[in-house]
Image (cartoon, rainbow, N blue to C red):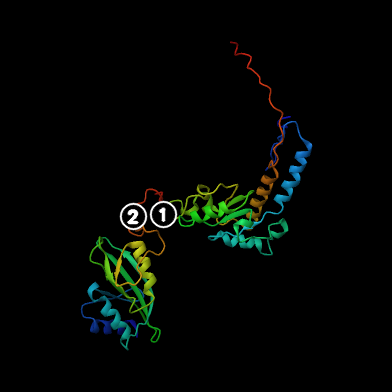
Amino acid sequence: MTNEELIEYLIQQFPEATVVQGTQFVEMTVMPESLLESAQKLKSANETSFDYLICLTGVDYPESIGIVYHIESTKLGHAMVLKVKTANREEPVIETLTPVWQGAKYHEREVFDLLGVKFNNHTDLRRLFLEDDWGFPLRKDYVDDVRIIER
Amino acid sequence: MGIMYKTNYKVNDYPVIETYEGGSIILTQLDAIVNWARSNSIWPLTFGTRCCAMELMAIGAPRHDFARFGFEVARASPRQADLIILAGSINYKMAPVLKRLYDQMAEPKYVIAMGACTISGGPFFYNSYTIVKGADHIVPVDVYIPGCPPRPEALLFGIFQLQKKIRHEKNFKSKKMKLVDVKPVFDKK
């Protein structure tokens, strides 16, 4: 489907989500409560059939932490962006998308490691690169007097 | 004899200093043989963590061959190596591993810090929370080679400097005569 058709389809199927055309992909922002359901619907619907998760990253906003999913359909050839924001920054919790796309497993571990977002129902949520008592380096307010030399 | 004075020093020149008291001819020649043998057959440990490893591979490759200088046998085990070329930046996660590898090497062992990251943290000196700012925080380094990455010829030059350093080592302790007890003249009591 082209971007315009995808926008129409998404507005029709997901009335509470915000659908925007980004520079390259269509971006859909959903609420955290309806994340798992929207993802399952995007994967199973025949018109869209997004079966491949390209990547998953975390973004540090001032009031919350956002997760951005880039998904693609190997059968139909289109790709889009799915965005979600957590409720707050002190206790960021999101539903895991591993049941929908298996590739999310390690990406979510990385986001947990570097940004501190907990994923519910994740089978193996532990740190991927850093040690257990390290802070969350990719947050904007990360301060490390011992290791970082500021410039 | 002391230092022999030279008037014009060329690049990479060094003053000649007597190595043994009294100028022991046998020990200096024996030293020369042992140092010559050691410097011409240094076996490096394959330790490339980052991009400098590509230049390390390049000196092993046919164009800049390090086998012609005796380094051909690059060992994978630190117990059999006597040089560790730190090719690449060292993380905080890798630092204890490097220390353990260095401890497992047998004397005489040498370390070459290759590239800007191992000298001082390099491009990651500012605003990085993972890279150790200089490998000499972890192991003692003999030769530093600047560059990011240093060209293979620069790495070979660094290895030649290490060879030069090895040739000046003093391996045998000469038996000194016992010093007679001398009282200082001005201390009249």
Give the residue at x 34% y 52%: A143
Picture quadrant of residue B46: bottom right
Tell me the number on the disc at residue B89: none
Picture quadrant of residue A120: bottom left
Specify whether B161 is left or right of A63.
right
Q: What chain is tagged by disc 1?
A: B
Observer-nearest of A54 and A102: A102
Query: Do circles 1 and 2 both sit on a common chain?
Result: no
Please tell me whether mark 1 sits on a helix, a strand or a loop.
Answer: loop
Crowding near the residue tagged with mark 2, few <14, some 14–19, many ≥20 C-alpha atoms within 10 Å = few
Q: What chain is tagged by disc 2?
A: A
Give the residue at x 60% y 54%: B84
* Residue A128 point in image, percent of width and height: 40, 65
Looking at the image, is B180 positioned above or below residue B24?
Answer: above
Looking at the image, is B6 positioned above or below residue A127?
Answer: above
Crowding near the residue tagged with mark 1, few <14, some 14–19, many ≥20 C-alpha atoms within 10 Å = some
Question: Amino acid type of disc 2?
Answer: Tyr
| Residue A111 visible to the viewer | yes
Residue on which disc 2 sits: A142
Callouts 1 and 2 close, C-beta under 8 Å = yes
Q: Please, which residue is most extreme toward the top here?
A: B189
Please tell me whether mark 2 sits on a helix, a strand or a loop.
Answer: loop
* Residue A41 point in image, percent of width and height: 28, 83
* Residue B102 point in image, percent of width and height: 56, 52
Q: Quadrant of the N terminus of chain A?
A: bottom left
Q: Please, which residue is most extreme toward the bottom here?
A: A46
Tell me the number on the disc at residue B129: 1
Q: How many marks?
A: 2
Question: Amino acid type of disc 1?
Answer: Tyr
Give the residue at x 50% y 47%: B137
Looking at the image, is A91 positioned above or below residue B84?
Answer: below
Q: Please, which residue is most extreme toward the left here?
A: A16
